Amino acid sequence: MHKAVLQVTHDYFYLFLKLCLMFNKMTPKQAMLGGALTALIMGGFIVISRFGVRDLFSGADLTFFRYLSGLLLLPIVLKLDFRTLGGLGWARAIFLTICAGWTFNLALMTGFNYAPAAHGAVFGPGTMPMFTAILSWIVLGERPSFYRASGLIALLVGLIMLGWGGFLESSPGAWKGDLFFLGGALLWACFTVAVRKWGVDPVQAVAVVAVLSIISFTPIYFTFFENVFMSASVAQLSLQIFYQGFLVGIVAVLFFAGGIQILGPTKIALFISLVPVIGTLMGIPILGELPGTIESLGIVIVVLGVLAAMGIRPRMLFQKKLTA
């Protein structure tokens, strides 16, 4: 009976994820749509996290909520051969978990204890495409063209403009937070390139990372951090667990991991650079935070930088309009 329930549960989740993402038959356009959806979810993640940290939760709480996704993905991991984890191997699985698991998420969250959100936008999501491009060049031999390299530079300039207010108001110890953000960005870039290098199945990668993260972080969380399960309301917990654990921990990461094999690590990583832009735009109606002139110009430059870094030239867009 137990094995039957486990088998049905595994088949349900695996079929659900495969049908939703269509990884085996994903086209470049579908992969780009998935990347855009990832950026949208992660942009909302900034707003939701602001609400959470401002009201009640800590970075450790939000990290624990994110990797509760491991409970949903556990049937997939249990189906794998324990000795090899479905051919992935324990060494690679641990490496991916360090790069995209709770160590990555907690590094980003810790950075906000020292530096403002604007620094997190630039040194976190903003530098991920750059680290990914550098590692892709070194590990995969994917050398960016001059046009795409120029787009990456424009992207960084736009992100700095977007976070201009936070840079002017930064405290003397903000550099500590910047190091945490840079460390988190480098870890995620390593995960992105490793998934492409090893040809890891996206569902398998996300499931293994989530399960190993919840197993290793749970004792740390309940031993060294004060959890909020007794003080937070059901509504507060439900919102954060659903958004952090399901939308961010499963949906967004799966779309991102699926796009790595189709678009390549450098291109799919560019969508992450749109996170602060989307977060800023969503913050206008939700948080009432209006960007200034410099920040608005930064948004435009970021978008243009992403297009250039993906190799999309203005004449290509013009030709598409003519043929439409």
Image: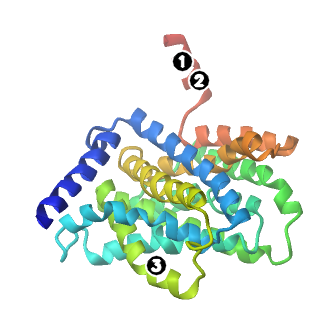
Res. 319 mark = 1
Three-letter residue code for mark 1: Gln
* Residue 318 on image: x %, y %: 59, 19
Res. 143 mark = none
Q: Which residue is mark 2?
A: 315
Three-letter residue code for mark 3: Phe
Dot 2: what SS?
Answer: helix
- Mark 2–mark 1 CB contact (< 8 Å): yes
Residue at x 74%, y 47% (from the top left corner)? 158
The quarter of the picture where residue 167 lies is bottom right
- Above-or-below relation of 285 to 113: above
Q: Residues within 10 Å of mark 2 (few under 14, many from 20)?
A: few
Residue at x 54%, y 25% (from the top left corner)? 316
Tell me which colouring the rendered structure shows.
rainbow
Res. 217 mark = 3
Three-letter residue code for mark 2: Arg
As measured in the structure, the alpha-carbon distance from the residue carrying label 2 to the one carrying label 3 is 50 Å
N-term-proximal mark, 1 vs 3: 3
Q: Taking 219 as reference, is 45 left or right?
A: right
* Residue 56 on image: x %, y %: 68, 67
Residue at x 44%, y 64% (from the top left corner)? 191
- Above-or-below relation of 150 to 122: above
Dot 1: what SS?
Answer: helix
Residue at x 61%, y 57% (from the top left corner)? 125
Q: Residues within 10 Å of mark 3 (few under 14, many from 20)?
A: some
The quarter of the picture where residue 18 lies is top left
- Above-or-below relation of 307 to 120: above
Residue 272 versus residue 79: which sits nearer the camera? 79
Q: Taking 112 as reference, is 106 left or right?
A: left
- Above-or-below relation of 49 to 108: above
Residue 58 versus residue 120: which sits nearer the camera? 58
Q: Nearer the viewer, mark 2 or mark 3?
A: 3
